[in-house]
């Protein structure tokens, strides 16, 4: 059975982007050989990449023009974009779905063995968190206090208890944390 994995890089104070969409300078602080290797490992283990509309639009803009091994994988792996406003999704191997995201992901989880990754996509992630669809949370912490921006986890979400699976310190000063949902969330 496939796992649905959240992958996000956030600041120490919890922001996954600055005040505007794609305001991500803290990614450069944490990026290095270790994170590049992790990115390749994750992409090679993926059956699908899953996005909400805003993240999809930014990803397609960047990755269609990018070159290199990561770009080749990003462009070749099947992608799903959940949106009720997009009319088309023309990035290579992309399927546009405009209905119940959690129900669709649950179906896909039962059909395969490789992983599905949600990158960015805070609104879509909130839906998956609330519906207990994530099997794992992988959070990269950049050693940056941003002060303001868009939090990954919004105030008012229901409490979710997680179990720490692993931690990994990066040479850049960042940390990768892996959590799975506790049984109490089911």
Image (cartoon, rainbow, N blue to C red):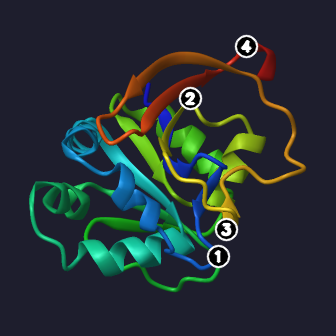
Is disc 2 surrounded by few (<14), some (14 to 19) or many (20+) residues within 10 Å? some
* Viewport quadrant of the N terminus: top left
Q: Residue 149: give its label.
A: 3
Is disc 4 surrounded by few (<14), some (14 to 19) or many (20+) residues within 10 Å? few
Disc 3 versus disc 4: distance between alpha carbons?
Answer: 32 Å
Which residue corresponds to the image point at 67% horizontal and 68% vertical from the top-left? 149
Q: Position of residue 145 (x, y in %)?
A: 60, 54
Q: Is residue 117 above or below residue 177?
A: below
- Of marks 1 and 4, which one's residue comes earlier in the chain? 1
Residue occupied by mark 1: 19
Q: Quadrant of residue 52?
A: bottom right
Question: In the image, which is nearer the foreground, mark 3 or mark 4?
Answer: 3
Query: Does residue 171 appear to the left or right of 101 in the view shown?
Result: left
Query: Does residue 6 appear to the left or right of 147 in the view shown?
Result: left
Disc 1 versus disc 2: distance between alpha carbons?
Answer: 29 Å
Q: Residue 183: give its label.
A: 4
Is disc 3 surrounded by few (<14), some (14 to 19) or many (20+) residues within 10 Å? some
Q: Residue 135: give its label.
A: 2
Q: Quadrant of residue 54?
A: bottom right
The answer to which of 37 and 109 lies nearer the viewer is: 37
Disc 1 versus disc 3: distance between alpha carbons?
Answer: 4 Å
Q: Is residue 183 above or below residue 149?
A: above
Q: Is residue 104 above or below residue 147?
A: above
Which residue corresponds to the image point at 20% horizontal and 39% vertical from the top-left? 37
* Viewport quadrant of the C terminus: top right
Q: Are marks 1 and 3 in contact (CB under 8 Å)?
A: yes
């Amino acid at each position: 059975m496939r796992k649905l994995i959240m992958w996000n890089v956030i600041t120490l104070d919890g922001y996954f982007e600055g005040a505007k969409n794609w305001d991500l300078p803290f990614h450069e602080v944490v990026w290095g050989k270790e994170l590049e290797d992790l990115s390749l490992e994750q992409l090679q283990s993926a059956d699908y990449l899953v996005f909400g509309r805003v993240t999809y639009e930014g990803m397609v803009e960047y990755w269609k023009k990018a070159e290199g091994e990561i770009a080749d994988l990003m462009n070749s792996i099947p992608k799903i974009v959940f949106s009720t406003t997009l009319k088309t999704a023309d990035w290579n191997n992309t399927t546009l779905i405009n209905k119940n995201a959690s129900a669709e992901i649950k179906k896909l989880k039962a059909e395969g063995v490789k992983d599905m990754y949600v990158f960015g996509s805070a609104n879509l992630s909130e839906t998956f968190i609330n519906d207990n669809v994530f099997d794992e949370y992988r959070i990269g912490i950049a050693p940056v206090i941003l002060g303001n921006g868009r939090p990954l986890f919004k105030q008012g979400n229901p409490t979710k208890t997680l179990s720490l699976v692993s931690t990994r310190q990066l040479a850049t000063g960042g940390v990768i944390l892996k959590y799975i949902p506790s049984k109490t969330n089911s």
